[in-house]
């Protein structure tokens, strides 16, 4: 869409943001136009989310000015931004689990009739938003218990009902599969036709090339490059993001030993999520699990880690049955899980990095039953250095970028020297540079003889790091592919059985 002669609906000029002495934004200029998708890219910590939070009224800028539709714009809170016509879908889910889907979609702005909440209208409009995204689920259902992917779709449906003139989408497809992503893109195309401006943040560069009209790249709190078209080689975009030449993404993966470490026999979920699953993972093998959203991948690895109950089958470790009934059973036997949602399931956000690492390793940081602060800091410093975490032991987890948060979750479990490491969506919402370092960690584990299971919705990722890939479809094991026979087509053929 041409922008010649048209004024931007949103203009940012010299926007700065500091937290005490730390400057996180350094004079950002940004224009957004009606009916245009502006991709905002950069590594974790580049400042993308801070820019989005300023635009959406979540945080105020320290300096600079904004204009919205030609008038001064300085929202004091998200409510003021929404009233002006600016909506945002956050990367972190903000749903209230004990409310219904409809109540979550309209929270804070319930439709009323005669002074009472008009539940019929609310549920009808929520249902329309869900249907637009292909989510066939009752708007009366509680959010509690829904998968991360379905919760993300509800967040998107919530934004679609705002009637906003500018939508900010922060990693909206991070938890979505191919079909859900395609439906979202259809809605974005429709919104563009209606003249809605869109700021789109994602680390999935191939989808940026599909959907963006313009690309703005940030690095270290500054805008470093702007591409007037999305028709740019991915390598060029990545090098602008990281500020260096990127020679490779996936490291060379090792050949596993013949020895079987983990075996799953005819495992069946007590929650009905999967059944009849059988596979073996060898010593030093990276075993990928692929499939569409709802296929039962996450539920399967949660069961192996003792988080979700099973109603049949066995989990064996080195030939001995150890079918875990609770997480501590799995941890005690050397099986650890890095969960798909690091913020809700992997970290205590308001606690320090040192404390988060210590929580999984109390026996190593305590002396005769007493927890020693000096030992905690020393232990944390060792693991921070070992796994390349950019942060200090005393820093709170919620002050870190997504990539560094993920490294902390990985570090706290690897400090236990496990025999089996399960990673569920290990690079979800993580930038290219941090993603590459996590792949190095995964391959390093395999080289040390650790058995690794990687669950991922990103086909390129699961193909790039796995020795073998098991594909799941509708709670069943659809097939297992060796590395030399696995590709996008073969995986999708099995996933859609």
Image (cartoon, rainbow, N blue to C red):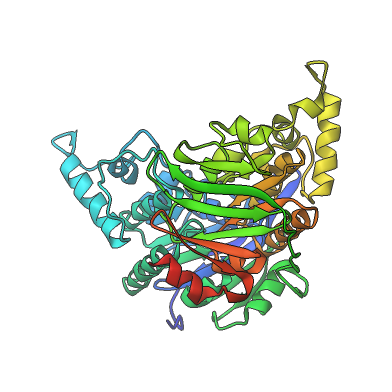
Relative height, residue 333 to residue 434 (above, below):
above
Relative height, residue 490 to residue 445 (above, below):
below
Which residue corresponds to the image point at 42% horizontal and 49% vertical from the top-left? 275
Asked where in the image residue 487 lies, by quadrant, the reply is bottom right
Residue 419: tell me if it is visible: yes
Q: Nearer the viewer, residue 158 or 316?
A: 316
Residue 244 is left or right of residue 5, and the answer is right
Asked where in the image residue 419 lies, by quadrant, the reply is top right
Name the quarter where the C terminus is drawn: bottom left
Q: Position of residue 372 (x, y in %)?
A: 82, 22
Q: Residue furthest front?
A: 319
Name the quarter where the N terminus is drawn: bottom left
Which residue corresponds to the image point at 75% horizontal and 67% vertical from the top-left? 251
Q: Nearer the viewer, residue 384 or 53?
A: 384
Relative height, residue 314 to residue 15 (above, below):
above
Q: Nearer the viewer, residue 2 or 90?
A: 90
Residue 425: tell me if it is visible: no
Q: Position of residue 288 (x, y in %)?
A: 59, 60
Relative height, residue 289 to residue 205 (above, below):
above
Residue 189 is left or right of residue 141, and the answer is right
Which residue corresponds to the image point at 47% horizontal and 61% vertical from the top-left? 291
Number of marks: 0
Asked where in the image residue 427 lies, by quadrant, the reply is bottom right
Which residue corresponds to the image point at 86% horizontal and 33% vertical from the top-left? 378
Q: Position of residue 258 (x, y in %)?
A: 72, 58
Q: Position of residue 411 (x, y in %)?
A: 74, 44
């Amino acid at each position: 869409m041409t922008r010649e002669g048209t004024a931007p609906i949103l203009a940012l000029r010299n926007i700065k943001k500091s937290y005490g002495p730390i400057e996180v934004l350094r004079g950002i200029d940004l224009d957004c136009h009606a009916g245009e998708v502006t991709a905002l890219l950069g590594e974790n910590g580049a400042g993308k989310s801070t820019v989005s939070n300023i635009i959406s009224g979540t945080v105020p800028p320290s300096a600079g000015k904004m204009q919205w539709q030609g008038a001064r714009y300085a929202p004091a809170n998200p409510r003021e931004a929404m009233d002006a016509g600016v909506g945002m879908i956050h990367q972190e889910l903000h749903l209230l689990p004990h409310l219904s889907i409809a109540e979550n979609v309209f929270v804070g702005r319930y439709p009323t009739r005669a002074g009472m909440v008009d539940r019929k209208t609310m549920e009808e409009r929520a249902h329309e938003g869900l249907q637009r995204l292909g989510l066939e689920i009752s708007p009366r259902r509680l959010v509690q218990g829904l998968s991360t992917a379905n919760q993300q779709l509800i967040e998107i449906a919530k934004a679609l009902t705002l009637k906003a003139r500018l939508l900010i989408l922060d990693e909206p497809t991070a938890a979505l599969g191919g079909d859900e992503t395609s439906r979202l893109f259809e809605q974005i195309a429709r919104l563009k036709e209606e003249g809605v401006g869109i700021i789109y943040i994602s680390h999935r560069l191939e989808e940026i090339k599909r959907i963006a009209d313009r690309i703005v790249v940030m690095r270290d709190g500054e805008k470093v490059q702007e591409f007037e078209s999305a028709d740019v080689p991915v390598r060029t975009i990545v090098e602008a993001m990281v500020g260096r030449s990127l020679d490779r993404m996936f490291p060379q993966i090792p050949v596993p030993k013949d020895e079987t470490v983990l075996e799953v026999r005819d495992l069946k979920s007590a929650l009905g999520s999967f059944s009849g699953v059988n596979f073996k993972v060898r010593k030093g093998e990276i075993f990928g699990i692929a499939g569409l959203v709802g296929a039962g991948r996450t539920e399967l690895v949660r069961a192996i880690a003792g988080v979700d109950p099973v109603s049949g089958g066995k989990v064996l470790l080195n030939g001995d049955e150890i079918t875990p009934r609770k997480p501590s059973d799995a941890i005690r036997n050397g099986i650890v899980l890095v969960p798909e949602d690091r913020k809700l399931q992997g970290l205590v956000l308001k606690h320090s990095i040192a404390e988060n690492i210590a929580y999984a390793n109390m026996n190593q940081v305590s002396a005769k039953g007493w927890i020693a602060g000096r030992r905690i800091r020393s232990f944390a410093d060792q693991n921070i250095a070992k796994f390349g975490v950019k942060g200090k032991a005393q820093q709170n987890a919620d002050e870190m970028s997504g990539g560094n948060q993920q490294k902390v979750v990985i570090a706290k479990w690897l400090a236990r020297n496990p025999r089996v490491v399960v990673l569920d969506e290990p690079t979800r919402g993580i930038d290219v540079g941090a993603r590459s370092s996590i792949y190095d960690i995964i391959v390093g584990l395999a080289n040390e003889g650790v058995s690794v299971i990687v669950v991922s919705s990103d086909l390129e990722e699961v193909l790039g790091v796995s020795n073998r890939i098991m594909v799941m479809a509708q709670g069943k094991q659809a097939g297992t592919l060796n590395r030399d026979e696995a590709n996008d087509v073969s995986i999708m053929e099995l996933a859609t059985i």
